[in-house]
Every structure is written in structure tokens, then in C-alpha cells.
Amino acid sequence: MGLVLGALSIVTAQFSPLGEPQQEFTGLHVVAAVLVFAAVACRRLAPWLVLAGTTVAAVPLTVVLGSQPLAVTIALMAAIYTVALATDRRTVWLATLGVFAVGWLAHLAGGPEPWWDPGNSVDLAFLGLAAAYGDATRSRRAYIAAVEDRATRAEQTREEEARRRVAEERLRIARELHDVVAHHIAVVKVQATGARHIGPSRPKQVAAALDAISRSADAALKETAYVVGLLRDARDPAAPTTPPRGLAQLTNLLEDVADHLTVDLHRSGEARQLPAAVDAAAYRIALEALTNARKYGNGTADLTVAYTPQAVTLDITNPIGKAQGRGSGYGILGMCERAAALGGSVTAGVDGSGRFAVHASLPTDVHAVTA
């Protein structure tokens, strides 16, 4: 581009405006062409240095030739355009006015026209055009870069949100599987162990144990099918749609564990319809706490369900047996995660009377439920 503009400046230097005498071609025009080439070739490496050097070199050329050569004007426009790309609007316009002032004084020193002659200010239009175009180009590039950056950050945010949702779903499914498997398999194990011991002496009771095993296995299969259905496509007609159990099924739960865990159930407050998420979480917390009481207690437990205007609370206590403390801890962790997802809380540990106590508080205001 620099070579093309330099050659073009040499060609145009041999033509004069209509009505004016033929301009003599001199070595200064070659110098001006070289100046164009240097300015265009080096402008991206050092924009300010090129602009300053071109401005200084333009002064003697303008004074000697009596007017600013076209090649010099082209070099200044290229330098100003490049500076406009690299700086802010205020700076580039101040620089443009400074370059014009230097050129205007050079015109006055070398030309015969008085200072008010409009011909001395023609270069201002060309320099202003270069500054305006460079500023517009910089603004457009900055806008495009900002849009691309926002799109990139939005894409990263979507990916992070997708990963977060996947992690939350995995935790939810893990809790569901733990609750289903831990409870029903525990029932099956207890019933099977009891049947093995009483088989030789009381064969009639073996049938009852087998019935309990069958019921627990059937319930485990149904609830596992529901959990697995969470992994299937929602558009799949074969995916289970039956909601998980709630507090209304507490009686069935107590019947399932009645053979090996005596539960004293108490209710306070007026029972009412709970949000589905709260109802399911309350049932699962009761299920996990009673399963732990059966595995690590002495065969008795107390369960209190209390309804208040803002929440439903569960208190499950049981004496500590010899096996206490041998669990994996995932059950208590799952209870805490269920409650936290709804804006509630769960505490579990040994109370002042030496019993293991689980206290769960779940808000029932649907606007407070976040899951």
C-alpha cells in the first residue's frame, strides 16, 4: 500500500489544477513520495512517532514548495487514522488540530496567500476526515469486541449453570437411591435374618417374614423405578410419573418396620396439605431417621410431627444401641441436603438424655421453597 501511494503521489505531482501553470517536478516530490511510503509502512509499529516525524518533515516541504504536497497530506492522513485507532476521541482530535496548526503556519511561511485565505485551511478537511474515520473504526471494533466478550461470558455462564444443575441432579438422585435402598434392603435383611433363626422352631412365622420381605422388595422396585425415571427423557411416555411418598404414608412406613421397631408416633398442630417438595422431603427424612433407629438403636423410637403456620417439624429420637456410629454418614448428609434445598435445617446427634435425636424443620410457605 505504501509503494502504491508513493507512486501515485509522484504521478499526481506532475499535474496542476486547471488554470494554473504547470508545476515543476523536483526531487522534493520524490522525498514526499518516500515520506508517504515510510509513514504507511511504519504507522502500525509506532503511530505517534510516525505522526510526529511526518508533521516535522512536512514543514520544510511545504515552505519550499509553497504548498503542501498531496503526498504529504496522504501521509498525515494515514498517520492520524492509525493514531485514532490506538487512542481515545479527545486525544486524536487534539492531535489533529495540532497537526493542522503546524501545516497552516507552514502555508503562511511558504505561500503568497494571506492568513485568512480559505486555501490555507483545505487540509483541515482531509485531516478531520481521517480522524473521524479512524475514531469510528475504533468504536466499531470496540463494540464488536464487547459483543463477542459478552457472548463468550454468556456461553461460559450457561456451561457452568448446566454443570451445576447436573451436579445438583446427581445429588438428588443419590439421595433418592440411598433412601430407597437403605430402608427396604434393611427391612429385607432383618426379616431374612429373623426367618433363618426362627425357622427350625417356629416355621409358621417364616411365612409372615417372607411376606414382609416380598412387600419391601416390591416397594423398593417401585420407588427405584421412580428414581430411575428421573434419568429418562421427560418426553418418554414410559417414564414414571407417580410422585414420591409423603407424610400421608407414615402409617404404612410404621407398619413396615413394626416387626423390628416400635415407634411411638405423636402429632401436634392441624395437619394440612404441604407443597409436594416439602411433603416428600419430610417423608424421606422420617424414613432415614427410623431406618437408622432400627439399625443402631434398641428397637424403640419416638416420632413427633408438628405443624406450625410457617413450617412442619419432625423429631425422631431413639436409645443408642451397641452398633451406634458404624454407619457411612450419607444418610444424615442426605437429610441435611434435602432440608437445605428447601430453606430448612436438620440437626442430628446425641441429646442431653443420652438418646440419638434428629430434628428437622421445613418451611411450608411455597414462596420460601427453592427446590
Image (cartoon, grey):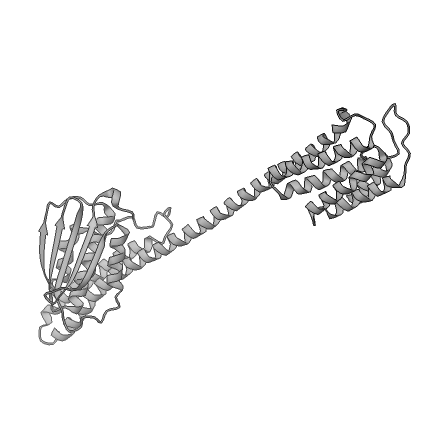
Q: Image check: 290 left or right of 26?
A: left
Q: Quadrant of residue 359?
A: bottom left
Q: Quadrant of residue 57?
A: top right
Q: Image check: 326 left or right of 11?
A: left
Q: How many marks?
A: 0
Position of the N terminus, as image quadrant, is top right
Residue furthest toward the bottom?
200
Q: Is residue 215 visible?
A: no
Q: Is residue 114 visible?
A: yes
Relative to 287, say whether 72 is above or below: above
Q: Which residue sits at x=24%, y=47%?
A: 276
- Residue 120: image x %, image y %? 76, 28
Q: Nearer the viewer, residue 244 or 370?
A: 370
Q: Nearer the viewer, residue 54 or 192?
A: 54
- Residue 93: image x %, image y %? 64, 36
Relative to 21, say whether 155 is above or below: below
Q: Quadrant of residue 333?
A: bottom left
Q: Image check: 172 left or right of 11?
A: left
- Residue 186: image x %, image y %? 21, 66
- Residue 312: image x %, image y %? 17, 49
Q: Nearer the viewer, residue 118 or 183?
A: 118
Q: Nearer the viewer, residue 150 or 9?
A: 9
Q: Which residue sits at x=69%, y=48%?
A: 46
